[in-house]
Image (tube, coloured by chain):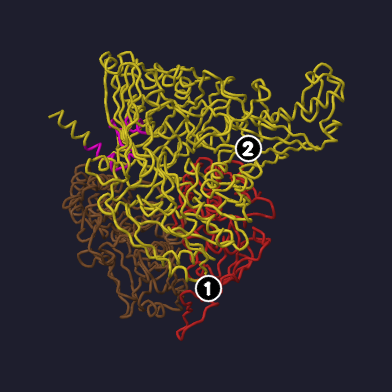
């Protein structure tokens, strides 16, 4: 039944670590310049990059400090490639319509919903997922704060919550309670751990300020 | 999971216009509304034309006459955080700050916010309603608690944008570019009522896109604000909203006022009645009370949205009380 | 009907053997109850926790289900020919595909089949596709052509109860009502009352919407099936999958190490598990099938909406003398509408009570147990009624409640006493911590932002746990330990407190305890985690297992030290003689232990005390701000006082209470399923924008918990009762009572959307105007 498709060449090799390779230093230093042009696509006479329906296009993303080249269909979401092709399942699927926050990742350091972002639009961008906050097996400060403050219950929305918090703190290292609540306003926690989440974000800010 | 589509990354504004002229082409700026619409089958796209390569459509620049130009691809978050916007165009800063959620504000653009499709649950569901070319407005005699009390007709959507009423209050315009050239359209004239065209929300022609939003220099003594009433404090559209731009004379009487509602009509709804009720007056309790009553004159509530009248009265009262304080 | 909390398990569950020893209750504990960080916190914050939806297997297919888009329809024809030819498509199932004629249990006395052509609600399964990628699966689904005969729909209880209503099921929409609950003489009770109040309350249809979607990954190895499922109970899934596929239980392994929330909706499986297994069998490849958020909204359960008429009579001194209720509810097309009357029968002393419940069927997805089934609905009515009675009597609402606190169960046969109840203390101590008296006395605010405080009490009909439960503790020669239990950790910290118990008894530090759980292939039988019963059910078995390990160690040490075992105790990592403390041996140096390498203890949970009943109790206090101009309500502060027995972990206990409050805020303010009555019988609130769950800006940051421990030595050997359910029962009426305090208007309909606040304020103003006129 059916034809063989051609997608399998983008599947991750087995045994790939669930965590991206972490380079030292600050993300951003590696600098894949956000591409105005889609280098992997053919261009028409006027210079527009064109990908036909159902065809694949090569994109290059810097994911957790590691350059990833892959073929994507234009309709694929960033969430799809992060989970199903790069194997980074820390990023969760919740609604696939930008209404829950479970898929939050940082794109160029800013929190966004990976489900509402086309993978092809992320070409040339830096993408940071939960796995990218780790140093080896050690948690980053935001993760540590969430663990210590018990800022979750089932833990499913937690990766998205942590990425939203991380993005908030990168933009605003010392947020007030009101700023924390507003900054976390794009991530639903059905278990209702919000009060602990607020504490965790404040604690993460402390830990980061102390350089821990 | 979306259906398949072709993808074009426009290399220039002219290129984008050319690509968008093709049958079934849709513009992608932030994608926060487009992706949802494509996923839900509210719209179909043969080709998605990405504007993300058009750097010239990003960012804000002061104009020589004291105004501000905001590139259409500037994100909502950038608008909300901009010091000039916050200082001179409070209504826009406040409106931008209460849109959707932080992540969507980081991704959604000001141009996209003006061009988003309505949130009516019939329109977003698999109903072939008037706005999708069918012959029934299901909300008319259905679950219409979130629908229009002004300006309905063949379709009773409310316009979902928060920035639009703020921009109308601030007397802003949009610059557009299309196959027939560029034009400037006051935001007030940018949206269309169902009686004009039930299939679209704006005056944009095929292939035409918004390139920037232009804010005039704020008049002397003007104060502006945006108040959004919603059921949930994040990630929710306005039940009703009130955008105000009011300039005061030295004697604290209202010199000029622009009052615009969201959440009550298929377009941002400018209330001449409220403007009239306050112009030349001090914003004391009596004037505010009259203005609040004037706000709902002519409203035609549906079966389940009658509450919008007292809510609108209340929001106007509160907003005027605050701006006059 | 006798109250029961056994809804989580359909059919007989095996009883475990009697407990081998009955240890004395703990006095002071060293680690149990302490606010320690979860043992799996690392996994949950780093992504190393693999949830079922994260499972990736070699050569795995991706599946999706095509569902009926109509409120009520009969499938006439399904054409899958185009779909079958599409790229990447490996399996297509529909009614009539060999192997799909599987009966599907819908509710007692009612079955349909896997792809039943009669679709009684939007969302019923019509066909399914498995393909190499999820995008291909959806492309193929869209290529399936289905012809439907549209049938008339009925989606409200009122419409369904009409005599000429379209029939949802053969036999009509109104099943025979159960016998009403009755005690005493209600008419005589009302005749003796000084104040009688009656009112009708309505509650919303709430959707569970756990963060992780419902679904599974299914994989066969010959005749053996493994299912990774997002579930509250792996054994419940094993049971229904084995039954549907006619497999031996031993051949169905269900694994659910992590799961992203359930709230009752994941106590049982859905057709998706069977569909995934069939497709995996057909293709010889593992299949991942997770529903979409919309499908979850349509098919994966809800809290039945109830309309509750309640009449109450009270004497001038505050003695309740009569309560009478009639309620109607709907659990959709297949299930009952729930019984919201438990609290009315049980929470307060009242000699004369009569309660009647009526179910109706509508064309909507079936209900599933939802965090304290029936209780938040009942509390919404009863606790607002108590507030109203207090106002009518000019009595403080806390005083009125305290006056009627029972110490025994009035609605269970024989009126058994509670093993413990601190309901009175929850009210009184809670009020003190909240600053109730001062807050009630505060003069009303001048502006349009009105402040108010309110209280509500509650209890949960379960929460005492029961057998069966088996746990195994292994102590290794280096003093580290492994705990094996079947229970799922659905986010309540089950693994953590379980490890704390092992640590308490054996002195093993938490970071030296590993846990195996929630796997029918490798762990002990357990009923699903739900109904606030996991702690009281599993904790005694875990304690017993640890004690059995300790007793074996003692016996071995006794032999070595030549002292009687009864004279020995475990102090840290040493076994020490109580009478001669110089006689001691390090655990690792016990000869018998070293040669064996491991000591295994098996713990069983004993029965509950006979003639007594164990329930948790609560009182919650809310402070709200109501915008009298716009109808917006903001919850600004919340305090919850709970008697759930001994807390196992203060941190996770508190977190769970906060979670219950947050969920209750959704009930009170924003959550409701809206259906398209006029046109197509569809659900209009399928998205998480239209179905509004509380966000970080809707839940107050200012929340606190007062933990009241009754030191219950009778309930079980750990003194614990459940906390999950009671945490959400009183929340919504506490908010409603605070709203009444703020604006003087009673909102009997939940959620208290601004729409309703404004309507009520307008009515109130109108009534006042009429009175003045």
Q: Is residue B245 in the magenta section? A: no
C330 w.r.t. C400: above or below: below
Q: Work out which quarter of the rendered image holds the N terminus of chain C and state it.
A: top left
Say which colour chain C has. Answer: yellow
Residue C743 relative to residue C574: left or right: left
Residue B69 image offset from top left, x and y in percent = 38, 68
- Residue drawn at the location 61% of the way across and 48% of the way down: C253
Helix or strand or loop: what does disc 1 sit on?
loop
The quadrant of the image that shows the C terminus of chain C is: top left
Residue behind mark 2: C496
| Chain identity of mark 2 | C
Q: On the same chain: label 1 and label 2?
A: no
**C-beta proximity under 8 Å, tags 1 and 2:** no
The magenta-colored residue range is C735-762
Q: Nearer the viewer, residue C474 or C32?
A: C474
Name the colour assigned to chain A in the rendering. red
Q: Is residue C752 magenta?
A: yes
Identify the hue of chain B. Answer: brown
The numbered mark at residue A3 is 1
Q: Nearer the viewer, residue C653 or A146?
A: C653
The label nearer to you, 1 versus 2, is 1
- Between marks 1 and 2, how big is the CA–CA gap? 49 Å
Chain letter of the residue carrying label 1: A
């Amino acid at each position: 039944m059916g034809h063989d498709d051609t997608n399998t060449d983008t599947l991750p090799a087995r045994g790939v670590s669930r965590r991206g390779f972490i380079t030292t230093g600050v993300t951003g230093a590696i600098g894949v310049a956000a591409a105005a042009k889609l280098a992997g696509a053919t261009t028409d006479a006027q210079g527009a990059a064109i990908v036909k329906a159902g065809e694949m296009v090569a994109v290059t993303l810097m994911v957790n400090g590691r350059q990833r080249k892959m073929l994507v269909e234009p309709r694929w979401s960033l969430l799809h490639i992060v989970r199903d092709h790069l194997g980074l399942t820390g990023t969760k699927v919740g609604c696939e319509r930008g209404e829950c926050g479970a898929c939050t990742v940082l794109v160029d350091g800013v929190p966004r919903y990976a489900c509402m972002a086309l993978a092809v639009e992320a070409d040339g961008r830096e993408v940071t997922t939960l796995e990218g906050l780790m140093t080896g097996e050690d948690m980053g400060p935001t993760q540590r704060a969430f663990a210590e403050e018990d800022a979750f219950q089932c833990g499913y929305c937690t990766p998205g919550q942590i990425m939203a918090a991380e993005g908030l703190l990168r933009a605003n290292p010392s947020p007030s309670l009101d700023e924390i609540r507003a900054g976390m306003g794009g991530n639903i926690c059905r278990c209702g751990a919000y009060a602990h989440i607020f504490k965790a974000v404040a604690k993460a800010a402390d830990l980061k300020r102390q350089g821990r | 999971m979306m259906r398949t589509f072709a993808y074009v990354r426009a290399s220039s504004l002219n290129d984008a216009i050319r690509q968008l002229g093709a049958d079934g082409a849709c513009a992608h700026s932030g994608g926060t509304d487009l992706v949802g619409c494509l996923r839900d089958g509210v719209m179909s796209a043969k080709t998605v034309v990405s504007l993300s390569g058009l750097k010239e459509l990003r960012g804000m620049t002061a104009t020589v006459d004291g105004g501000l130009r905001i590139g259409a691809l500037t994100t909502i978050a950038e608008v909300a955080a901009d010091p000039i916007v916050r200082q001179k165009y409070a209504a826009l800063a406040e409106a931008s700050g209460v849109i959707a959620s932080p992540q969507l504000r980081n991704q959604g653009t000001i141009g996209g916010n003006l061009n988003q499709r309505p949130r009516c649950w019939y329109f977003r569901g698999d109903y072939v309603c008037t706005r999708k070319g069918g012959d029934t407005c299901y909300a008319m005699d259905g679950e219409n608690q979130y629908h229009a009390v002004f300006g309905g007709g063949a379709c009773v959507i409310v316009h979902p944008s928060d920035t639009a009423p703020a921009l109308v209050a601030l007397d802003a315009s949009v610059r557009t570019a299309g196959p027939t050239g560029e034009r400037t359209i006051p935001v007030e004239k940018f949206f269309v009522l169902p009686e004009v065209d039930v299939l679209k929300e704006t005056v944009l022609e095929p292939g035409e896109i918004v390139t920037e939003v232009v804010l005039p220099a704020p008049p002397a003594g003007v104060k502006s604000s945006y108040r959004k009433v919603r059921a949930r404090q994040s990630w929710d559209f306005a039940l009703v909203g009130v955008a105000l731009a009011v300039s005061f004379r030295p004697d604290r009487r209202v010199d000029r006022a622009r009052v615009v509602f969201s959440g009550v009509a298929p377009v941002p709804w400018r209330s001449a009645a409220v403007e009239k009720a306050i112009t030349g007056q001090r914003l004391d309790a009596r004037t505010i009370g009259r203005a609040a009553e004037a706000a709902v004159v002519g409203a035609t509530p549906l079966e389940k949205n009658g509450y919008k009248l007292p809510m609108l009265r209340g929001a106007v009262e509160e907003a005027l009380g605050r701006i006059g304080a | 009907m006798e109250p029961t909390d056994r809804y989580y398990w359909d059919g007989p569950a095996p009883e475990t053997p009697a407990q081998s020893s009955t240890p004395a209750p703990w006095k002071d504990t060293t680690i149990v109850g302490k606010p320690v960080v979860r043992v799996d916190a690392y996994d949950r914050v780093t992504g190393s926790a693999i949830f079922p939806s994260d499972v990736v297997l070699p050569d795995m297919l991706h599946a999706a289900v095509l569902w009926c888009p109509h409120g009520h329809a009969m499938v006439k024809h399904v054409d899958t020919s185009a779909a079958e030819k599409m790229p990447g498509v490996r399996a297509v199932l529909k009614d009539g595909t060999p192997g799909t004629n599987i009966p599907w249990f819908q509710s007692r006395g009612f079955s349909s089949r896997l792809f039943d052509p009669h679709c009684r609600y939007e969302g019923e399964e019509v066909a399914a596709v498995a393909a190499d990628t999820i995008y291909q699966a959806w492309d193929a689904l869209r290529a399936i052509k289905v012809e439907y005969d549209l049938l008339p729909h009925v989606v409200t209880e009122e419409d369904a109860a009409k005599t000429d209503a379209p029939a949802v099921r053969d036999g009509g929409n109104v099943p025979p009502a159960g016998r009403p609950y009755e005690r005493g003489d209600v008419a005589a009770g009302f005749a003796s009352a000084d104040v009688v109040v009656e009112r009708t309350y309505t509650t919303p249809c709430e959707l569970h919407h756990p963060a992780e979607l419902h679904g599974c990954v299914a994989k066969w190895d010959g005749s053996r099936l493994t299912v990774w499922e997002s579930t509250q109970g792996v054994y419940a899934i094993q049971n229904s999958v084995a039954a549907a596929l006619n497999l031996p239980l031993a051949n169905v392994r269900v694994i659910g190490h992590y799961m992203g929330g359930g709230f009752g909706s994941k106590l049982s499986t859905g057709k998706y598990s069977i569909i995934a297994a069939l497709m995996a069998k057909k293709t010889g490849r593992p299949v991942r099938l997770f529903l979409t958020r919309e499908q979850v909204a349509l098919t994966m359960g809800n809290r039945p909406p109830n309309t509750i008429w309640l009449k109450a009579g009270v004497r001038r001194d505050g003695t309740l003398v009569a309560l009478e209720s009639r309620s109607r509810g709907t659990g959709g097309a297949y299930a009952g509408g729930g019984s919201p009357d438990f609290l009315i029968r049980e929470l307060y002393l009242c000699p004369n009570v009569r309660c009647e419940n009526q179910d109706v069927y509508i064309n909507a997805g079936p209900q599933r147990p939802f965090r304290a089934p029936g209780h938040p609905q009942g509390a919404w009515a009863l606790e607002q009624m108590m507030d109203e009675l207090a106002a009518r009597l000019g009595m403080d609402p806390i005083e009125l409640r305290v006056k009627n606190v029972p110490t025994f169960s009035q609605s269970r046969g024989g009126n058994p006493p509670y093993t413990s109840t601190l309901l009175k203390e929850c009210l009184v101590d809670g009020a003190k911590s909240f600053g109730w008296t001062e807050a009630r006395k505060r003069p009303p605010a001048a502006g349009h932002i009105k402040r108010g405080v309110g209280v509500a009490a509650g209890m949960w009909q379960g929460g005492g746990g029961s057998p069966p439960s088996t746990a195994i503790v292994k102590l290794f020669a280096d003093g580290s330990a492994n705990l094996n239990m079947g229970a799922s950790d659905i986010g309540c910290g089950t693994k953590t407190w379980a490890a704390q118990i092992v640590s308490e008894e054996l002195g093993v530090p938490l970071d030296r305890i590993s846990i195996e759980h929630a796997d029918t292939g490798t762990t002990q039988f357990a009923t699903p985690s739900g109904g606030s019963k996991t702690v009281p059910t599993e904790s005694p078995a875990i304690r017993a297992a640890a004690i059995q390990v300790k007793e074996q160690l003692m016996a071995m040490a006794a032999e070595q030290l030549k002292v009687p075992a009864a004279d020995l105790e475990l102090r840290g990592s040493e076994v020490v003689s109580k009478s001669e403390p110089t006689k001691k041996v390090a655990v690792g140096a016990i000869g018998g232990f070293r040669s064996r390498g491991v000591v295994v203890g098996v713990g069983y949970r004993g029965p509950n005390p006979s003639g007594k009943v164990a329930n948790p109790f609560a009182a919650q206090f809310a402070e709200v701000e109501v915008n009298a101009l716009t109808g917006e309500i903001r919850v600004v502060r919340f305090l919850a006082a709970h008697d759930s027995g001994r807390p196992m972990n203060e941190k996770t206990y508190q977190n769970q209470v906060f979670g219950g409050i947050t969920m209750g805020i959704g009930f009170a303010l924003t959550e409701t399923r809206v259906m398209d009555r006029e046109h197509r019988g569809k659900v209009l609130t399928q998205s998480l924008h239209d179905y509004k769950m509380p966000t970080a800006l809707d839940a107050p940051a200012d929340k606190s918990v007062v933990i009241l421990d009754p030191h219950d030595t009778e309930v079980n050997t750990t003194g614990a009762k459940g906390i999950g359910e009671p945490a959400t029962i009183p929340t919504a009426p506490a908010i409603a009572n605070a709203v009444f305090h703020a604006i003087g208007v009673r909102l009997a309909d939940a959620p208290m959307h601004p729409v309703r606040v404004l309507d009520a304020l307008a009515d109130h103003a109108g009534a006042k105007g009429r009175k003045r006129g």
